[in-house]
Amino acid sequence: MIEAVSTGQINAGLGSRIEYGHESIFTRFGFTEPDGSHIAVTSHQFRHYLNTIAQAGGLSQLDIAKWSGRRDIKQNEAYDHVTPGQMLQKIRDAVGGDQMFGPLAELPKKVLIRRDEFARLVVPTAHTTDLGYCVHDYSASPCQLHMDCIHCQDLLCVKGDAGREALLRLRLDEAKGLMDKAQAAKAEGYLGSDRWIDHHRSTVDRLTQLCSIMDDPAVPNGAVIQLATPKMPSRLDQVSKIGEFQPENEQTRLLADVKALLGE
């Protein structure tokens, strides 16, 4: 008499009843777990395994549900055993390829260091400022510009932050007013006013550049903006400008200022 093979017989052959003396196909051929224990699986576990392979291979949820005979694709989740590490590797493999869209799609596949490792190196920390975020590493050195953030390349601004954008525009108006005052002081012959003009002009230029980027519709909200390092005048440049003054005229102006203070 011939009988159909039952699910119980298949599972017994796969090791589900090995503790009752039933030999499995694995013990017959000498296969064991890494720790030496018996291998035991069920026929339903292969269903989980095939579904996981389909998930890892990128098969659509609708196709997996149809292939598995399910009415609701939400049931696929119970059969998805793709690990976080496998998913992370899938994303990394897609960087620079056809399966990635956006900035990471332009990243070369062969790089010297991973993007996340590079980010941890160049941005060890971030501090909130009134204009944005400071990524200077204070454990390495103190602030080199005495909180003159607008002239620092470590300042990062985020488009879409209405409060900070309003403050940027307020700072721009203030810088323009200060530059006008410095120019008026230079016209009146005040010593050192030319240095203030250079400083305020640089401040106006950088704030104007930032505001222009904020107003650019091509730059999406949430974009992180970092201006290039400004070219500040060196001490040698400042010293070289001293020769441009006429010593006699400078002494005359200083003497006039002293007399004015003394009321003479």
Image: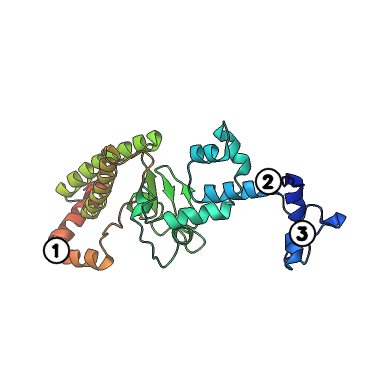
Labels 2, 1: front one: 2
Q: Which mark is residue 44?
A: 2
State the residue lying farthest toward the front.
Answer: 1
State the residue lying farthest toward the top.
Answer: 71
Q: Nearer the viewer, residue 251 or 186?
A: 186
Q: Residue at x 63, y 46 (%)?
A: 47
Q: Nearer the viewer, residue 200 or 151?
A: 151
**Residue, disc 1:** 244
State the residue lying farthest toward the right.
Answer: 20
**Gap between marks 2 and 1 measured at Cα:** 90 Å
* Residue 124 x/y as whole percent: 49, 58
Quarter of the rendering containing residue 208: top left
Labels 3, 2: front one: 3
* Residue 243 x/y as whole percent: 16, 67
Q: Which mark is residue 103?
A: none
For label 1, count other residues whose C-alpha is less than 10 Å away and answer few (under 14), some (14-19) or many (20+): few
Whether residues under marks 3 and 2 lie with C-beta atoms below 8 angstroms apart, the answer is: no
Disc 2 marks a residue whose amino acid type is His
Quarter of the rendering containing residue 29: bottom right
Q: Which mark is residue 24?
A: 3
Disc 3 marks a residue whose amino acid type is Ser
Above or below residue 71? Residue 171 is below
* Residue 238 x/y as whole percent: 23, 63
For label 2, count other residues whose C-alpha is less than 10 Å away and answer few (under 14), some (14-19) or many (20+): few
Q: Is residue 148 visible?
A: no
Whether residues under marks 2 and 1 lie with C-beta atoms below 8 angstroms apart, the answer is: no
Question: Disc 3 or 2, which lies upstream in sequence?
Answer: 3
Q: Nearer the viewer, residue 230 or 51?
A: 51
* Residue 229 x/y as whole percent: 31, 58
